[in-house]
Amino acid sequence: MDAYYGDAEHHYGGSGHGIEAYGVTRAFGTVPALQGVDLTVPYGQVTALVGPNGAGKTTLLLILATLLAPDAGRITVAGHDLAAHPERARTAIGWMPDQFGVYDQLTVDEYLAFFADAYRLPPAEKSRRIRALLALVHLDEYLGRPVHVLSRGQKQRLGVARALIHRPRVLLLDEPASGLDPRSRVELRDLLRSLAADGVAVLVSSHVLSELEEIADRVVLVDRGRTVGAHAVADLAGTGRVRWRVRALDPDALDAALAGRPDAGEVVRLPAGAEVGPLTEPEAARMLTELVGAGVPVVGFGPASGALEAAYLAMTQDRR
């Protein structure tokens, strides 16, 4: 995190929540978007906001970023009441929307300097800050070059730098990995974990559930404008029955062993194995032990989906 904080010492330690939202509602005409969302985002953790299209995630993020007013509800960000003091909350918020415009006529460093000036960064700090952030998002080679030469993924990384320009205590990201290549996705994951480790309250919305599971400490599930669950990601594992994938060096031997097992559930043949279940973790462990004991050369055995994806699929089961 040295590149993020530069030569200054900043650590947002301590307990508490960067965001507290209760009973948040918002309608667009006669169409309800949020119908009583409750949400807390602790300092020092990454909270994932998960839900199907139309669940109200972006509307909620826009409200938290002070860009949209709620119809009802109570919200505080970094201890500031959004209804009474939105301008104080904005000084603590780093915001990266799903799609954002860039000023193509500016260079990369001029673009960040514009936002540094908006946040009134001291002139002596601004230049160091910009260079540190460009290095952090691996765009330092584009110093002095126009924004319009950047690819979509590079512009996404520039958006991350823009959101961090004023060292926010609360970070809001809507689909931040959109357009990023695999290496950039890994670097974004590491950056968000580092920010959380330093005490920043991070709220991220994404449809890439496998990546959220690697990033997030907590998940808040929303559907039809309501909060339907909040869990520690670590607690989701092993709490339900999921499908499992088995890989074996001898697929025929695996097929024969599974054919005689009533507990295998629906068996789907795969090129190098099979998918079975749904099973709980203890049931899956027993099956693996018995397959190996029967001489099946198993080389891979694991959930067909992550715990977060399983929770999401269970939440949206009635939408099939």
Image: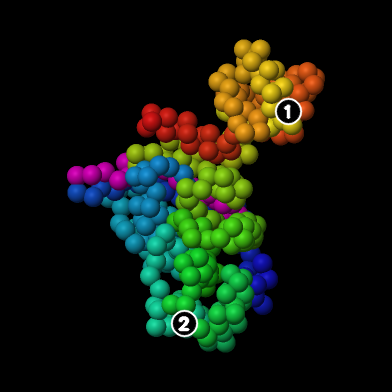
Membership of 204 in magenta stretch:
no
At label 1, the amino acid type is: Asp
Instruction: Give me the C-alpha separation between circle 2 and circle 1.
Output: 56 Å
Residue 41 magenta-highlighted: yes
The amino acid type found where label 2 is placed reads: Pro
Residue appearing at x 38%, y 70% in the figure: 101
Residue 58, percent from left and from top: 38, 52
Identity of the residue drawn at 62% across and 33% down: 271
Vertical placement of residue 224 versus 78, above or below? above
Residue 280 in picture, x, y percent from top left: 62, 24
Quadrant that contains the N terminus? bottom right
How dense is the environment of label 1, judged by Cα within 10 Å: few (below 14), some, or many (20 and up)? some
Q: Which residue is mark 1?
A: 250
Up the image or down, 254 lies above or below 215; here it is above
Image spot of residue 99 (x, y percent)? 40, 62
From the viewer's perspective, tell me whether residue 219 is left or right of residue 65.
right
Residue 227 in percent (x, y) is at: 41, 39
Q: Secondary structure at mark 2?
A: loop
Q: Which residues are magenta?
A: 30-47
Q: Earlier in the sequence, mark 2 or mark 1?
A: 2
